Amino acid sequence: MTIALAGNPNSGKTTVFNALTGMHQHVGNYPGVTVEKKEGELKYKDYEITVVDLPGTYSLTAHSIDEVVARNFVIEEKPDAVIDIIDSSNLERNLYLATQFMELGVPLVLAFNMSDIASKQGLEIDKVKLSELLGAPIVFTVATKKIGINELLDEAINLVEKKTTIRRTTPSYGKEVEEEIRKIEDLLVKDKDLIQKYPSRWLAAKLLEGDSEVIKKIKESKYSDEIIKQVEKSTAHLTNILGDTPEAIIADGRYGFISGACSEAVKRTYEVRHTTSDKIDTVLVNRILGLPIFLGVMWLVFKFTFAASAPLCDWLDAGMGWLGDKIGGLLPEGSAIQSLIVDGIIGGVGSVLSFVPIIFLLFLAMAALEDSGYMARAAFIMDKLMHKIGLHGRSFIPMLLGFGCNLPAIMATRTIEDRKDRIVTILVNPFMSCGARLPVYTLFIGAFFPKKIAGNVLFSLYLLGIVVAIIMAKIFRRFLFKGPAAPFVMELPPYRVPTIKGLLIHMWERGAVYLKKAGTIIFAGCVLVWFLSNFPWNPQYSKDYDTLIEQAQGNEELITQLNNQQTFEKLEKSYAGKLGRAIAPVFRPLGFDDWKVTVGLVGGFIAKEIVVGTLGTLHSVGEADEESESLRQALQNEIRPDGSKMYNPLVAYALMVFVLLYIPCVATIAVIKRETNSWRWPIFAAFYSTLIAWIVSFVIYQGGRFLGLG
Amino acid sequence: MERNYLPLSLVPPGKEVTVVAIHGGRGLRMRLTDMGLNEGMKLKVLHSYGSGPCIIQVGDTRLVLGYGMAQKIFVKEV
């Protein structure tokens, strides 16, 4: 049998889902949309049960994709039971969704979750009476302690076996509305196919509410003309006599039904004036303290992520190196197959894995902020500021995460409900200078800027990224995604202590998506760059390196030199090298028409820090990192064909700006593809950001020259 | 509009008011209704950043209203 879990966001739905299915869950997508579909299996008594976690929603209107997905699942897949998770300490609002399941006439079980908190707050619920009034069995649960989970399953099975004695009911919307509903129903029943699929009363009510999806459905009916005419007539009639739109009256009817039932069966033994959450909020969202506390929290998140991931990254690196050596040793030395496996495949897997510690730990920290309820406060605190750039509070966290790594940052945009806001946030996110770009800055700042101003130069780059992001967000909002900002309403959940299990599951869910979906694209990208920089495999060398190396036996220094020269020449003559030379003139107006840098920039598509390593190879200094003095010297001494110096501080700065802004790395592109579910946005992001990079570098270089700086 | 109606943005924190009208598109009104804020309901302003966003309490629900939203909700004093 199939059970669907429904409920408001923050009702503890996910906790119930985890309690039901444990680790036996998998994530997919509902067909054709980006909404995540979580499913899990369990065995209970003699039943094999599939639990489907519907998206968390407040309602079942056609206004949001989540709601449409949830209700279509219930209507089309006809689950054997729907369990609606209700936050007991917020009964009336949570029951609003339940009334809409009642209208659909589905077998419904109400899980009054967090019932312990409700009773602590002085709420006394007469379970039997309320069950009868609402027409659905009620089970008290405390999902975090696994209380009531089996009873939930028992009630669901009772429904399936038709052992429940409770009679289903639906809210009444008042005499006038009911009359009009009946008139519309009389026309609807003519279409037998339609009525087989949908309850007629529900259809009629939805038509009065002006539900766009239902109207679309009705237009396919052969009786659509009469039906639509009647709906228009009824709507006009109701608006006229009741002085409000039918949807407002129907909503009133639902709330009326709920408060009627609650006033009979729910007692408040005492009034809770200030809950603990409200008390905490007087400090955390305080006008003066709110912002500094928030920034402090974010600082801790970064500190934690990078401090904890550094050793893990080192182990992974060492592990992959060891694996490469071991496997490489089994293969013919210097062969293409060895290089493919060691540098291409193992190297590619290595770069996928190298993100894992940071991504997982950042998601762990984010899950803690989300589950504790702090995230909603952060959105509130940042809303005013973000509004100035046409976005709202929810966009701030992803932007901030971008300074660590753009991958989790872009995945974190999922909390932004409005699609326009979400895509704008995704598109400008790569301008937040991520950690991988830092080595490039370190190298060039070290080589071309005095120590005294090094910090300021670095800071100016980060700042420039933010400024460009703000400008682009404004431009996108004005031209690409016109229209007013989506209204930003969000529930403020009470503070809760997150459970370890919940945090781990959240971390794993997101991390697994990265590994599965983005991983493959990153891997393919790495193999492609490996191919470009290694083929043709045996180029025509200017010297016979093999013989020279043999002759130099014993002279280690000479051998290293020869080896470096050979790698240099191989890369120079590879497709990547040729590409570098071909593209280099494009950068002449920016000051750095250096084919070596261009090759580095091509490699930087895999990960920005690769620019450094590639430059090391091309300057024949062997393995180099950003602190390498010999590489810095080589860059300082680089000359143009006419004998003048290639680099000066201005050129170096223009180059760093280019690295900051140009095409996001392949992993980011892969995540943009994954999160927008189309190739359109990642391709757009790749081109527009490279164009912006060129323009900004151009302005800086030419402007600097005009001012006599270089 | 009667004189004693005022936008929510002018209500100081701590005050309890009744929602009279929500001036916004269908989408906004429906969304607020779904989240528990309907015309005729009582609400209390918990925190407010001036004309910017605010946090309100309706029944047992606490809602964050983003920038500009508070100007669209008209209330009267209880």
Image (cartoon, helix red, strand yellow):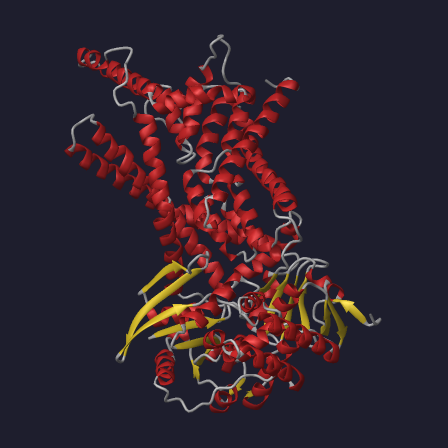
Q: Report the front residue among A299 and A239.
A: A239
Residue A198 shows in the view: yes
Q: Report the front residue among A607 and B45.
A: A607
Q: What is the quadrant of residue A265 in the picture?
A: bottom right
* Vertical relation: A567 (above or below) A306: above
* Vertical relation: A124 (above or below) A149: below
Residue A36 is left or right of residue A210, and the answer is: left
Residue A411 is left or right of residue B13, and the answer is: left
**Outermost residue, top side:** A642
User: Where the N terminus of chain A falls, by quadrant?
Assistant: bottom left
Identity of the residue drawn at 57% across and 78% down = A187
* Number of dots carrying numbers: 0
**Outermost residue, front side:** A222
User: Where the C terminus of chain A falls, by quadrant?
Assistant: top right
* Vertical relation: A175 (above or below) B35: below
Identity of the residue drawn at 42% across and 76% down = A82
* Vertical relation: A291 (above or below) A47: above
Residue A403 shows in the view: no
Residue A133 is left or right of residue A162, and the answer is: right
Query: Horizontal and vertical percent for residue A3?
Result: 38, 74
Query: Horizontal and vertical percent for residue A30?
Result: 42, 60
Query: Horizontal and vertical percent for residue A231?
Result: 64, 74
Query: Horizontal and vertical percent for residue A27?
Result: 37, 60
Identity of the residue drawn at 21% across and 31% down = A338
Q: Report the front residue among A368 and A617.
A: A617
